Image (cartoon, grey):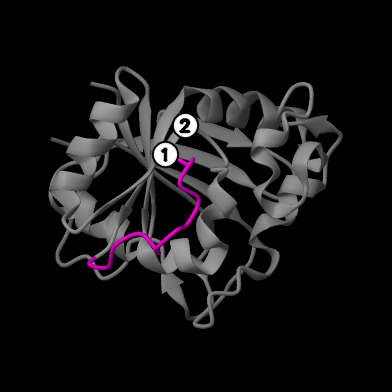
Amino acid sequence: MGTVIMHNVVSVDGFIADKNDDVGPLHDWYFNGDTPIIEGGDQQYDHSGAGSRFKVSRASAEYVRPMWEAIGTIVMGRNLFDLVNGWEGQPPAGDHVVVVSHRPKPEGWRPEASYHFVDDVTAAIDRAQELAGERTVGVNAGEVGSQILAAGLVDEVAMDVVPVVFGSGKRYFGTIDGQLLLEDPHVIIQGDGVLHLRFKVRR
């Protein structure tokens, strides 16, 4: 099975969006450099209308590109699915998406897209790993991500830390209860307007 990585862009004080789900300047670094994340401008990543215009610093591109290429399946919560309409059936990375939700896929929604709806986080990771094979499972941080982390199903935590303080909003680690230890960061990369960090989850 591939590695399960919980990942998100995050403010210095630990928020992935404000209380209205607005990400503010958190994604500005995706557009402030001269190096495309996707070589050749692959339109499969055109979920934001940016397509090949995702241009970051060289340091960020060298980190993000192989990370995105390694992902086979993304696991997301229903709130994010509804906010972005499932990226219109074109996830930013990987070939499959598993949505954790007590509600089924909207009737008639993108039947060609490999999107799978399950109502339990353990079942979500099982399905995601089955779909991903040896590739990485990327878990969006937030409430669903924190449930998967608390269940002991996350191998690594990846954070793209942006120098902004939100003060309040949607937390990267959701409402996780109690302490959870991580190893020292094994990736520390300074980009332009972002610091990339990765930690293994201590077992």
Task: Name the residue located 22 percent from the left edge and 51 percent from the top edge.
Answer: 148
Which residue is more in the foreground, 136 or 178? 136
Examine the rendering and report whether any part of residue 103 can be seen: yes
Distance of label 1 from label 2 (alpha carbons): 7 Å
Q: Which mark is residue 114?
A: 1
Dot 2: element: loop
Q: Is the magenta stretch mostly helix, strand or loop?
A: loop
Q: What is the magenta range?
A: 102-114
Is 126 left, or right, of 91 in this rendering?
left
Q: Where is residue 111 in the image (x, y as percent from the top left)?
A: 45, 47
Q: Do the residues labelled 1 and 2 touch (CB within 8 Å)?
A: yes
Q: Position of residue 154 (x, y in %)?
A: 24, 40
Looking at the picture, does residue 127 appear above or below residue 19? above
Which residue, given by chain and number where applicable, does mark 2 sit on? 95
Check residue 201 for magenta coloring: no
Dot 1: element: loop
Q: Where, quadrant-wise, is the N terminus in this rendering?
A: top left
Q: Which residue is at the far front?
A: 108
Examine the image and state in which quarter residue 53 appears: top right
Q: How crowded is mark 2: few (under 14 residues within 10 Å), some or many (20 or more)?
A: some
